[in-house]
Image (cartoon, helix red, strand yellow):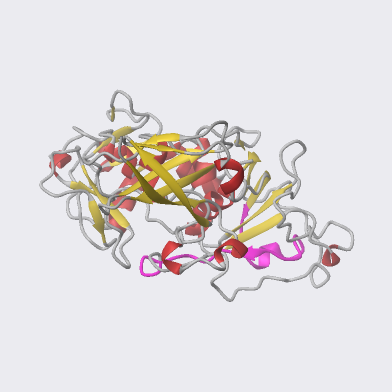
Amino acid sequence: MKSHTLVGHVRGPSRDDANAELPPKFWRAGSSIQQIPIRGFNGKLAFSPNFANDHALFAASHYALYFSGDEGRTFRKVFELPWQAPLVDECCSPAATPPPPAPPAGSPRYVACGRTGRCDESDRWAAPSEKHEVRCCSDSRIDGWKKKDGCSVWSESDDDEMGGKCHHNKNLAQASTICEDAGARLCTRAELQGNCARGSGCGHDRDLICPDGPTQQCRDDAGPPWDDDLETYGPNVRYHDNTPAEPILPADGACPGALAGACAAKGVKAAYLDGPIDCGGQGWFCRIMPQPGWGDCSYGDCNFANCATPDADELDTDGHCHGSDDDSTYGWWVRDHHFRGYTGTLNCCCGWGAPMYGVVNRCDYRKPVSGDEVATCRDANEEHDVDFNPTCDAHPLKPDPVTNGGMCWTVRSFAAK
């Protein structure tokens, strides 16, 4: 039985103290990395019984393991925590498929075939300005749209909601608008590669299609790469589908206006946690508040006080506040803080800046990440010069918008414990 040594990289949530001594070539989105020796034999990997104790870096919902052999092949496995037993995984088949190429700088869009295996071109990275055909998906039923066995979405290419015609040669922005106007959304990469939009018309089974996105995930964002969600979770599964997160609808049962479009296209939970939100370009801010039995700032980054709290300007103990003046950043921040384990009740509202005066004493900021930046950005929560510290004493106290008619929404039991 042949035996050989492989070198693996355990990747989990980012921590500055863990990253400080690592060479840049090992950095990746949301990663703290430790090299470890692993002995491979007969096409399998075996981990010693002490592996979990020796190499667990930080608490997290999952880690990804990367390793390579003498022949230059690279392999990847995502596994969940806690480790209940030594892990064994298939790894070393000579027919192992090489990893997909990295996106070229400024091109975070991954275009996929309308029906797997039917296109003359392979699925690949492409610039958002590149033009492709359009298919739309909806998480709720639309009359005349098709739902495939094993899929959770309805799809179409030329129904009345799409103007009764086929849509060819559209860039990302144009394709997104077409689907939004139809009360739907662009299909995700996982849905396209899972054949959930096949046979929906216009001959697009043989065309590359614009999928949902694009990513704003930077190197230090926690959690698995968004572009690997199909591998990590499987077809038609979102990262938060099997989590306890509970979106709270208003008393009338309708999604808040900022999420109405996303709710119609994706369903309530996906809208609350993925967006996109429509705050009219005014931005947003969220507060992760303590929730009995779920979260009490144990993540160690409480950073603000509500202005209704006595002596608020002397405190930062009410939870974690984060926001942006760009609506498009919302879902990327939620995903990052979910995987960082910022547990509690998530209260979010439209309005960054002046609407927050008299509500909170300070709040962290997340910058938007353009296609030109996404290949090189490190941390969208830090790589900016925005310092929002209005203080409470400088402004009249305002009623909290969450309970006083603001454009707000709430998620209980937020984030991975």
Q: Residue farthest to the bottom? A: 385
**Camera-side residue of 162 and 176:** 176
Task: Check the image and report above or below for 224 versus 252.
Answer: below
Corner quadrant of residue 114: top left
Residue 218: x and y, percent?
46, 61
* Residue at position x 28%, y 40% in the image: 192
Residue 200: x and y, percent?
21, 34
Left or right? Give the position of 73 relative to 139.
Answer: left
Magenta stretch prevailing secondary structure? loop
Residue 176: x and y, percent?
33, 51
* Residue at position x 32%, y 67% in the image: 106
Task: Check the image and report above or below for 61 versus 176.
Answer: above
Residue 11: x and y, percent?
49, 52
Residue 183 appears in the picture as rendered: no
Q: Please tell me whether residue 353 belongs to the stretch shown in magenta.
A: yes
**Camera-side residue of 10 and 413:** 10
**Camera-side residue of 52 and 270:** 52
